[in-house]
Image (cartoon, grey):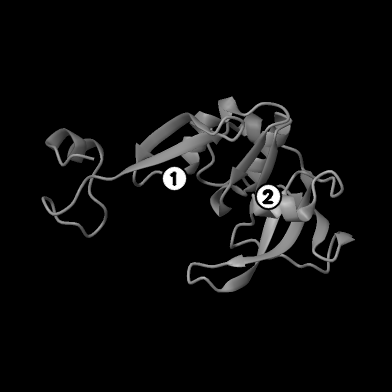
Amino acid sequence: MPDTKSNCEAYPYAPGIKPGSGFPIIRLGGLIDLGHGGLQDFSFSKFKTSELRGHDALERYLEAGGIFVGDRLYSTYEIIGRLRRKDAHFTGRTHQARKIDFRKGRKLGPNERLLTYHKPRSQPKGSQLSKQDWDALPASMEVRIIRSKGPNREGKQRVRYVVTTLLDHVKYPAEEVSSL
């Protein structure tokens, strides 16, 4: 964005950038409706704010039967639980902190399992839910984990784990879900 005084006050430079040698940074998030391929809406926040705060603003567009495709950051228990409460679905890679043990759960095929996610014992620090809304999330949720291969940033093929609430492996084949 333009390097103006008002922009710099509201949206500072990235860490390590000296005034006058860069641009103020803003965090933008967008929701693209794949039904028509257009931007549904977008949200913005300060750089030091989590992208998840943008999801809070955009979640109102997600309706029953809809599918939210998000990156690893969005595969939290809270986001998935909030979507399920609206009868919307989630598909995205599992968060890098979540360890997947493919020996557990109900086997659906060689590369997919049904697992149970349990609600964390305490509400995460960054959660924007009220205590009442947090308590209203289910104690556990069944999710489907799909193991697939895809290129990393260097172009090398790596194993990826995709989590989805689309549990019917016949109606939603693993290859199609993981391609999202």
Q: Nearer the viewer, residue 48 or 71?
A: 71
* Residue situated furthest left in the rendering: 20
The amino acid type, in three-letter code, at marker 1 is: Ser
Image quadrant holding the N terminus, namely top left
**Residue at 68 percent of width and 56 percent of height:** 162
- Residue 163 on image: x %, y %: 70, 53
Q: Secondary structure at mark 2?
A: loop
Q: How many marks?
A: 2
- Residue 101 on image: x %, y %: 76, 67
Label 2 environment density (alpha carbons within 10 Å; few <14, some 14–19, many ≥20): few
- Residue 175 on image: x %, y %: 74, 56
| Distance from the alpha carbon under mark 1 to that under mark 2 | 22 Å
Label 1 environment density (alpha carbons within 10 Å; few <14, some 14–19, many ≥20): few
Looking at the image, residue 68 sits to the left or right of residue 102; the answer is left
The amino acid type, in three-letter code, at marker 2 is: Arg
Where, by quadrant of the figure, is residue 66 drawn? top right
111 over 12 or under it: above or below = below
Q: Nearer the viewer, residue 139 or 97?
A: 97
Looking at the image, residue 154 sits to the left or right of residue 72; the answer is left
Residue annotated with mark 1: 50
Marks 1, 2: nearer the viewer: 1
Instruction: Tell me which label, 1 or 2, sits earlier in the chain.
Output: 1
**Residue at 50 percent of width and 31 percent of height:** 38
Say which mark, if any, is on residue 62.
none
Say which mark, if any, is on residue 121.
2
**Residue at 14 percent of width and 56 percent of height:** 18
